[in-house]
Amino acid sequence: MSDPDPADFPIHWAWEDGPLTPGLTCVFRVKNEARNLPWVLPPMFDAVQHVVLVDNGSDDGTADIAQRVAEEHGAADRFTLAHYPFQVARAGAEHLHTPPDSVHSLTYFYNWSFSHVRTSYSMKWDGDMVLTAEGVELLRDLSWQLEDSNAVVAVPRHPMSVESESVAWLDLGYRFLEPWVYPMGPEFTFVKAFEWEVREFPSTSERIVAPEGMCVELKWLDQDEFAHWSDTVFDPVRTPRKARELEVMKALHESRGHEIEGLKRIEAPAGVHVVDYVTKQWMQLEPRPLTLRLELQEQGG
Amino acid sequence: MSESRRRVVFVVGSGRSGTSTVAGALQALGMHVPQPEVRADETNPKGFAESRWVVDLHHELLQRCHVQVSDARPSAWYETGKAIASGITRARLTEWMGPQFKEAQVTELGEEPAIDELVIKDPRLAWFLGLWKSAALRCDAQAAHVTMLRHVTEVVGSKKRYYAPGPSVISRRGSAFSEVQRTAAWVNMMLHTERATRDGKRAFVRYDDLLSDWTVPVFRLGQELDLEAVKAASANDIRKVHQFIDPDLKRVQTTWDEIEVPARLRELAEETWRGLSKLAEPGGDTPDVHALLDEVREAYIAFYDEAEAVAQSSVVAARREGRQQALDERPPTPEGFGVRARRKIRRTLGQ
């Protein structure tokens, strides 16, 4: 098979062809997320009007699983599956040395992925982030309330390390906040930053911060969570979130979870998977505030 | 996942559409309206079935968002949407709602039954449904919405009769304006309430159906929304509802002949009514009807944007007038610090 031709992957924005349709589209750019998608996709289909999933060279059946979940959920007509065949630079040093207009750049990859959006609002989402029941309700509302507002929405997420089917560790030490929901338009495209891409938005855009408890970010203790980074030495000033994640992961691998401030062990009732338990029940019933908000310098993603 | 028996019914719809009647009927059947309630008055002699705390909260939030109870602006939904996203307000509602549910208990006065099913009603409620859905989730209660439907001309006529100032206070032009504003606000409220409740458990009840034979729609609510108080209603409970619902309630029967609104707004209001009426039919809550209502909603937004653009001069003039009025009403300022300081320096220097 011949190498893919970059000319076959141009970025053509839907707004250039006419008005966008109302609603919110969630865009996933994924590689080897087959394990997570059965948890991630169903609540997302419940929350938004359309889902775009761009597979970037998975070898674990990610695309097939995604298509199957969409069909089983009765959402195949609201689902777009695309393939991006180029190797994309890993976050960190590799990204820094890749020009933004290269098909190997995260920046280009994001813009190409978002060019599939046909609605007036879009949302960047990771293939390991699971919406809670309350998160589904919030996005459902925002999907029609935002309309022409030009606002961006930041959603706090809670990293959750899954130890077994019934036990997980939820990191409630910090509030990891990042804007995820943006209008579509020329003022809201991706540009290059040092470690990764960032999405631009005008200073006139209002910023809405969603409450805590809307989503968890899955991490599996039996997997190398840092494989997509070009190195695992994190500068705690520039990438404090990653440094914390590494600290948590190391502690859990060494059975020292209880020593980490803000890390909470959760055990699901018998017969219920801990991911379902946390996202559909525990998170809603836990008293607020959820996070301790320990001192940590946070960089916007 | 949860098998909770807790239920919260949110009664929504435009004011003067029978929201008090349906909430009061559910209350008479044994559902709990959190106390204390807003007192009955001549506009609603049988009571409102509205919790004081809920009304006060909504009033405060609407003021903070600069949104009126009957607001015709489509963008008002974005303004209240921002309030809905507040973690602090969500926590506040949950703290209030949690203790409204009660386990059965035996006291000195006898046995007090459990409170598992609540009714929350307020004409302002539709603006903040997201907040309430979140509180219900956090209290492990299943949320359900009941939307009351009454034809727009009757709602506007009823509001005119009960809420409007007398003819000596308002000019004919002013009266026509308020009819247009009320009709537009009804369209805005009903279309967006439908959108806000679309993905959850819900039912639509026509005001006429409720008044002609309340047992049919209320029985259906019990079945569709799984309300134990309705499903297990005793003969005494049923009697209470008959005593509560006044068959002569439908006192205002206004038609388009008596309401002066632009033809396009009238069309939009009629299209809204037709769409919503379909939802009230058994099995009528379908994607086709949702798509139809989405089209009407888009058309209304376009209509409002156009009207707003045409009326820009009035908006600018009103803003100027308001600014001038605020200046005129400002109490005279005491001498500023700068003036006093300069005077003191002059005195010190003997000038």
Image (spheres, rainbow, N blue to C red):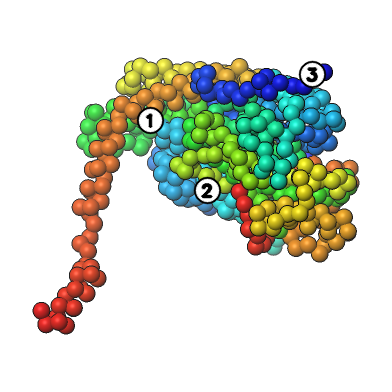
Q: Are marks 2 and 1 on the same chain?
A: yes
**Residue B113, how many percent across, how many down?**
70, 50
- Between B334 and B245, the residue placed more toward the observer is B334
Could you tell me which chain the residue with mark 1 belongs to?
A: B
Q: Which mark is residue A2?
A: 3
Horizontal arrangement in the rendering, residue A142 relative to residue A195 (left or right): left
Could you tell me which chain the residue with mark 2 belongs to?
A: B
**Residue B155, how many percent across, how many down?**
42, 28
**Residue B3, how many percent across, how many down?**
78, 41
Query: Which of the image's four quarters has the N terminus of chain A?
Result: top right
Number of the front mark, 3 or 1: 3
Residue A157 visible, this orientation: yes
Q: Residue at x 89, y 43 (%)?
A: A271
Q: Indicate the secondary structure of the residue bearing disc 1.
A: helix
Disc 1 target residue:
B182
Q: Indicate the secondary structure of the residue bearing disc 2.
A: helix
Horizontal arrangement in the rendering, residue B221 relative to residue A219 (left or right): left
Q: Residue at x 24, y 57 (%)?
A: B330
- Between A35 and B19, the residue placed more toward the observer is A35
Crowding at mark 3 (Cα within 10 Å: few <14, some 14-19, many 20+): few
Crowding at mark 2 (Cα within 10 Å: few <14, some 14-19, many 20+): many
**Residue A22, how many percent across, how many down?**
54, 26
Q: Which mark is residue A164?
A: none
In this view, B99 is above or below B126: below
Disc 2 target residue:
B54
Horizontal arrangement in the rendering, residue B69 relative to residue B327 (left or right): right
Which three-letter amino acid code belongs to the residue tagged 1? Arg
Which three-letter amino acid code belongs to the residue tagged 3? Ser
**Separation (CA) of disc 2 from disc 3:** 66 Å
Horizontal arrangement in the rendering, residue B141 relative to residue B346 (left or right): right
